[in-house]
């Protein structure tokens, strides 16, 4: 309790301060950790244990990213993953190893054992930056993610290289590289099969039960199980979680999973950066500050330059290539793992591992400053018309919450007009039935703010609540409007009692579900009775005016029995409770 209180308290204070200064949350967490750590106030100890636990945040982050990428989209990115990613890791690793050999007295083996880990960037830092700026789904964001994904895939080859260079006799009996590669392929295939034949049926069962808390349990179980399988084989836990996410990306439960996992991801990722800050060896920096600073500058410069050249070779404009180079110029969290591996292999001394851990942490701290300092320089020039093209957005223009008979009709009209729609419902049987007709409906509670945010409400132009019965109230709509002020809200009301209940709600339109169909039927009946079109229209106009006047009074008073004198035909007393909707 003591450690948790201090960690959260310092995180809250420093992140708010650094956000206020425009420096980003990551730097706030790092500084908070450094202040809490053993080299400043020494209020919280055992940073390594906390780091091991907080790495779950990276695992959850990769799971959420995997949920955004179905296998077909991932396949389309194969050129960037295998091309851009491979060149980045190999060329940056070679350049950094060469620079270390030229500028230090490290042996070639030690330089390779340090240079290759430094080629990896911080997934935990870069992806949240892309998400917060709204660029993750743009072409630029996809390329940055492709590089980061290949870096995660490269962990096994890098461990194999360090093991092959090892001077520790204990490593001689370790498994060969080809066996590790085979185990990796088998583990990935096993996760794919488990996702298809075990996890999806599990979520369907929970969806039918309607147990929300079990969805949270099942989501965390999925992430931890995938990570544990990979960890058992000595592989990247984040990679396992990513594969699990990809396997569920095209399932109807995607948005519900995102909403359930996101809070845990945010807290644990913050704790990860706190632990990294606590591990920052200020003593090592104080003993040799010039070396640490010069190595950090060299790391950032070499990586930014190499990535810029590689990005240009892949056809990126120079501004985008520069932005990619600066964004990925820092060292990454997996560097700490590989430095420990190199130390165990007797390739570097523990003191060197500590020094380069400080180099990685400092490089991570510089990224927000670099992106801020170069913002104008990297920005696309303003067009002749004075406007700048915004980033592309893959989100839908409209969200429909509730895909029953009402929502289906509304959705088909919107789609006929060319409006892209995201559909959300909690009825598993209906979701399956809709899938047989080619409609993609996601499972989730569309009255939850986090659920709507995951479904893209922040970018949507309209949200249509087509829920059956009495499931909405005014506070819910106020909360949705406050969270997503850009989206117009349209609401299906069961009857006039629900309209009264929603009085004051910030809805663009509230429609009683049977009102228009009742008027249509009445018109048809009058036409069949032989009335002229003029008489039918006059009757409809009078009814609508009287009904609107009566409803306005009822909404104002909150009394569904008010304005009974406006009824064209006064109902019998025993029928009063069944007043037409």
Image: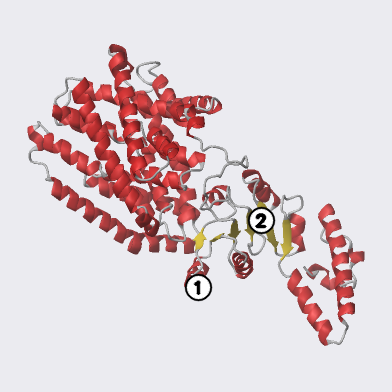
Q: In this view, does 527 lie to the left or right of 157?
A: right
Residue for badge 1: 437
Image point (30%, 42%), residue name: 151
Q: Which residue lies furthest to the right in this view?
A: 565
Could you say whether the residue bearing mark 1 is in a helix, strand or loop? loop
* Few, some or many residues within 10 Å of mark 1 (<14, 14–19, 20+): few
Q: In this view, does 515 lie to the left or right of 370?
A: right
Q: Which residue lies furthest to the top in this view?
A: 287
Q: In this view, does 426 lie to the left or right of 60?
A: right
Q: Can residue 522 be seen in this view?
A: yes
Q: Position of residue 466 (x, y in %)?
A: 64, 62
Q: Observer-nearest residue: 71 or 505?
A: 71
Q: Position of residue 353 (x, y in %)?
A: 23, 25
Q: Note whether 474 is above or below 45 in the view shown.
A: below
Question: Which comes sooner in the sequence, label 2 or label 1?
Answer: 1
Q: Position of residue 374 (x, y in %)?
A: 47, 29
Q: In which quarter of the image is the N terminus?
A: top left
Q: Position of residue 476 (x, y in %)?
A: 65, 50
* Few, some or many residues within 10 Å of mark 2 (<14, 14–19, 20+): some
Q: How far is mark 2 from mark 1, CA to CA?
A: 28 Å
Q: Note whether 493 is above or below 301 in the view shown.
A: below
Could you say whether the residue bearing mark 2 is in a helix, strand or loop? loop
Q: How many labels does the image show?
A: 2
Instruction: Mark 2 and mark 1 in contact? Answer it, CB < 8 Å.
Output: no
Image point (25%, 37%), residue name: 91
Residue for badge 2: 472
Q: Nearer the viewer, mark 2 or mark 1?
A: 1
Q: Residue furthest front?
A: 384
Residue 540, numbered label:
none
Q: Residue 102 sits in which quadrant?
A: top left
């Amino acid at each position: 309790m003591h450690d948790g209180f201090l960690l959260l308290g310092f995180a809250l204070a420093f992140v708010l301060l650094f956000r206020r200064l425009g420096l980003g949350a990551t730097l706030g967490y790092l500084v908070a950790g450094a202040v809490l750590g053993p080299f400043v106030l020494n209020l919280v100890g055992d940073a390594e244990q906390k780091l091991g636990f907080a790495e779950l945040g990276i695992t959850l982050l990769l799971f959420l990213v995997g949920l955004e990428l179905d296998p077909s989209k991932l396949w389309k990115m194969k050129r960037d993953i295998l091309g851009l990613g491979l060149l980045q890791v190999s060329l940056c690793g070679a350049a950094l190893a060469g620079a270390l050999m030229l500028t230090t007295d490290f042996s070639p083996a030690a330089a390779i054992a340090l240079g290759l880990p430094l080629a990896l960037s911080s997934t935990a830092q870069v992806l949240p930056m892309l998400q917060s700026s709204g660029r993750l789904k743009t072409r630029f964001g996809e390329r940055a993610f492709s590089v980061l994904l290949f870096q995660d895939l490269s962990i096994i080859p890098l461990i194999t290289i360090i093991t092959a260079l090892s001077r520790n006799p204990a490593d001689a009996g370790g498994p060969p590289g080809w066996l590790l590669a085979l185990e990796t392929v088998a583990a990935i295939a096993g996760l794919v099969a488990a996702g298809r034949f075990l996890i999806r049926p599990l979520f369907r069962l929970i969806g039918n039960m309607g147990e929300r808390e079990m969805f949270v349990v099942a989501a965390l179980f999925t992430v931890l199980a995938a990570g544990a399988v990979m960890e058992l084989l000595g592989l990247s836990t984040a990679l396992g979680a990513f594969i699990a996410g990809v396997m569920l990306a095209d399932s109807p439960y995607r948005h519900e999973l995102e909403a359930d996992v996101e809070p845990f991801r945010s807290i644990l990722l913050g704790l990860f950066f706190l632990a990294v800050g606590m591990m920052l060896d200020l003593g090592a920096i104080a003993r040799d500050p010039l070396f640490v600073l010069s190595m950090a500058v060299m790391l950032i410069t070499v990586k930014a330059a190499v990535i810029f050249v590689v990005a240009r070779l892949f056809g990126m404009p120079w501004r985008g290539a520069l932005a990619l180079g600066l964004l990925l110029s820092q060292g990454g969290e997996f560097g700490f793992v590989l430095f420990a591996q190199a130390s165990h292999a007797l390739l570097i001394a523990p003191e060197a591992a500590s020094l380069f851990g400080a180099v990685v942490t400092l490089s991570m701290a510089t990224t927000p400053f670099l992106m801020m300092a170069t913002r104008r320089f990297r920005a696309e020039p303003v067009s002749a018309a004075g406007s700048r093209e915004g980033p592309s957005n893959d989100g839908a223009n409209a969200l429909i919450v509730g895909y029953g008979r009402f929502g289906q009709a509304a959705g088909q009209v919107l789609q006929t007009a060319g409006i892209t729609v995201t559909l959300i419902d909690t009825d598993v049987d209906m979701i399956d039935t809709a899938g047989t007709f080619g409609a993609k409906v996601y499972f989730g509670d569309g009255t939850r703010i986090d659920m709507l945010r995951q479904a893209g409400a922040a970018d949507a132009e309209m949200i249509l609540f087509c829920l059956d019965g009495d499931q909405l109230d005014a506070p819910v709509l106020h909360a949705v409007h406050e969270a997503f002020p850009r989206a117009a809200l349209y609401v299906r009301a069961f009857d006039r009692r629900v309209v009264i209940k929603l009085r004051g709600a910030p809805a663009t339109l509230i429609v009683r579900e049977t009102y228009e169909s009742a008027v249509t039927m009445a018109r048809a009946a009058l036409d069949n009775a032989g009335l002229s079109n003029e008489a039918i229209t006059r009757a409809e106009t009078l009814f609508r005016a009287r009904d609107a006047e009566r409803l306005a009074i009822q909404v104002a008073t909150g009394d569904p029995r008010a304005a009974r004198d406006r009824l064209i035909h006064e109902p019998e007393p025993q029928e009063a409770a069944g007043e037409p909707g």
